[in-house]
Amino acid sequence: MGSISRRSFLAGSALTAGAFASFGIAGCAPKEPQTVAEDGAVGAASSTDTRTHAANLNPQTDQPEVANGTCPSLFTGWSMGSLELPNRIVKSAAGYIGVTSQGILGDLHLQHYASLAKGGAGIVYCDDFAELYDHFKAIPDVGKFVDWTEDDLKAFTQNIHDNGSLAGYQLATMGLVFSGFEEDPNALFQSSDCMDMTAQEIQDLIADTIKAAGVLKNCGFDCVEINAAGENIGQTFMSRNRNKRDDEYGPQTFENRTRFVCEVVKGIKDTCGADYPVQVLINGVEENDKNVGDNALFTTVEENKAMCKLIEEAGADSLHVRIGPCGMHVAEFAGDLYFAGFGIEGTTGYGTQFDFERHWQGMLKSDRSGLGIMTKAAAEIKKAVSIPVGAVTYMDPARDPEFFEKLVAENELDFILMNRPLSVDPEYLIKLQEGRLDEIRPCTRCMHCHWDASGDGSLTFSCRTNAAHPFRFASGQLTGSYQPEPAETAKNVLVVGAGPAGMEAARVAAERGHHVTLCERKSSLGGLLPFASNVKGPHENLAPFKTYLEKQLEVSGVEVITNQEADADFINKQNPDAVVIAVGSKRDTLGLSETSGTNVVSIDDFMTSEIADNVVVVGSNAQAIDVVMYLIAQGKHVQVVTPSAASEIGAGHSYWIKTYTQPIIKALGTRFWPEATVSSIGDGTVTVTSDSGVEVELACGTVIEALDGLPNTDLAQGLSMEVYTVGDCDKPFNIGEAICAGNAAARQI
């Protein structure tokens, strides 16, 4: 039976040697997965092995180790029509349902946009949150306000202006209902398209959009953007895949395909003045992610170049270019989800996988886990027009300052659009300009921020690394405002445990003015973050997140003590006014012994243990599924046995991470056994009692115990001071909930 040693297991990872070194784990990382022969020799993965073939597609380049750096060209001025802008960064439109539901002038809504404006982006675009169309109403629950006044909109724009930025409004049509629309109750984010519209409805929508732009200009918005991408009407006219009309708005010519967008742009210019800036958002290149390769009618970059010339002639002042898939709405603005599966980059969410050298015309930047994914396509479109062109879809200069500096310095793009990174850290641009990259709170691309589903099926919106997210306040998980209030009385606070929850609690308590000491029994900080980063790979930016937390302890003046076991006696001797216990969870175990043919390994130790070719992972939480993906990338055959229901598999991952990773895991041969138990371990096998009550024998050389964590609050017992238990030691779940618990506790001290 083949097994892998610690050395060869780590060598097979797609992580960089630098990433391992930063966490004290020695090893090298070739770009391609490795296989291990029966004699233990390490060699290249066979192209005939289905599982390792998936890992051989779309090789990733090493992530540059960036400690500091700047992008001076991003902070130079440029013109968008009549607007003179101070830098090349634009905040793209996006909204939060939990905040916008409070109303246009809701406190959280205004605070959120004020923080974005203070952050320094040249323009802050807001999402399409007001019902501005006379003839059409959106389907329920799309986050638009039915009731609004011009005074409301004026106050909103004034808030952005007062905080130092320009205000832009994105006019979108997603969710509008037309006469030919047949709603599918099972379709998420389904929307009408041009085929549902009568000729009169087309004219009504053009007139409504022009009128809406006039209202927005009167209310102080400095520019508008026409969303002609994704599920919006402009895109459905421009795409031959969706447009089958036989009138003058049909797909027969480029003039016809762009007629709707061009008439809207011309009408806005006529109504608002030739100098009123209008930006148009388009799909830069389209592809079929639902049926990979069936793309004959999907819009190419060359077609877009022809159509963008017509849009420019109509009067558009700039172009905003994003990715254009057809099946998964979320990928229309978060195309980096295609890289969410470690070792299976290119996963579509349908159990299939892109080959980025062949699909998307090879026009996506696909070697850095989706960073700057649309820059190649946008740069090509820029060659066809003379107006400014910008790209979006995970633009995060802190992850590679040299690349983003080159984009503007060498005139490949005129500007970049950002959303998630700016929402995670509103001071991002200030820190970037000053070269303080290690102080930027990174977006970890977990996608908890967008239409996430909680255990009870309700929708949630949160940020893994920034607990002070609008939804956390709207839901009552945090109190106060985005910035925690200074403490009335400075206290001596002891934090025990330097995982994410403990480090966040220490940071916030110190920022509030408390005297904080952080004790960690190990020699290094981060808790399970190093483990998570090693298993997940670089996609989720957990190594930079650990660096950020460590830097914040330094900046906020927290005293850090490592190699210190903090038991009750130690805590009582320190006699703090308050103590935060963040020691992590206990690990549950099967209580079964290994045999000569099947070893039993804890999830904590699997990266340094002998792992056989046939593996059974017991447990199905987020950590367990991350381990499954890692092992698949090594060419292992993995099965998952879990006491949890099938609906709970991947608990702790966001809805969208589960959507993109679990289909490909199954397609590559992994079998899930929900509501099942391992009843015995044999010699090269395990016996599983399935949910139907029958026993099944599985080939298995290694069992990895990855059961859910258990609360670990014993240390809190018997302490007489103010005590808070946070993170996994209190309620084991995931990084985001741990961060939120640490932040909330520090606000209460």
Image (tube, rainbow, N blue to C red):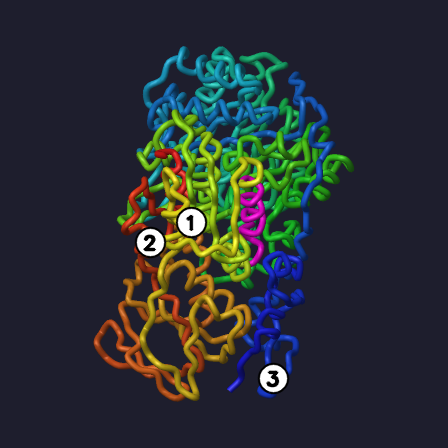
Residue 43 x %, y %: 65, 78
Residue located beneath label 2 in the image? 715
* Whether residue 347 can be seen here: no
Residue located beneath label 3 in the image? 40
Residue located beneath label 1 in the image? 496
For this orientation, the residue located farthest to the right is 410
Name the residue located 45 percent from the left edge and 13 percent from the top edge.
154
Which tag, 1 or 3, sits closer to the chain's start?
A: 3
- Disc 2 is placed on an element classified as helix
Q: Quadrant of residue 143?
A: top left
Residue 595 x %, y %: 40, 86
1 vs 3, front mark: 1
Three-letter code for the amino acid on which mark 2 is drawn? Leu
Q: Observer-nearest residue: 214 or 515?
A: 515
Name the residue located 61 percent from the left edge and 36 percent from the top edge.
254
Using the numbered discs, state the Cα–Cα distance from disc 2 to disc 3 in whole angstroms. 45 Å
Name the residue located 44 percent from the left edge and 56 percent from the top edge.
565
Q: Which residues are magenta?
A: 537-552
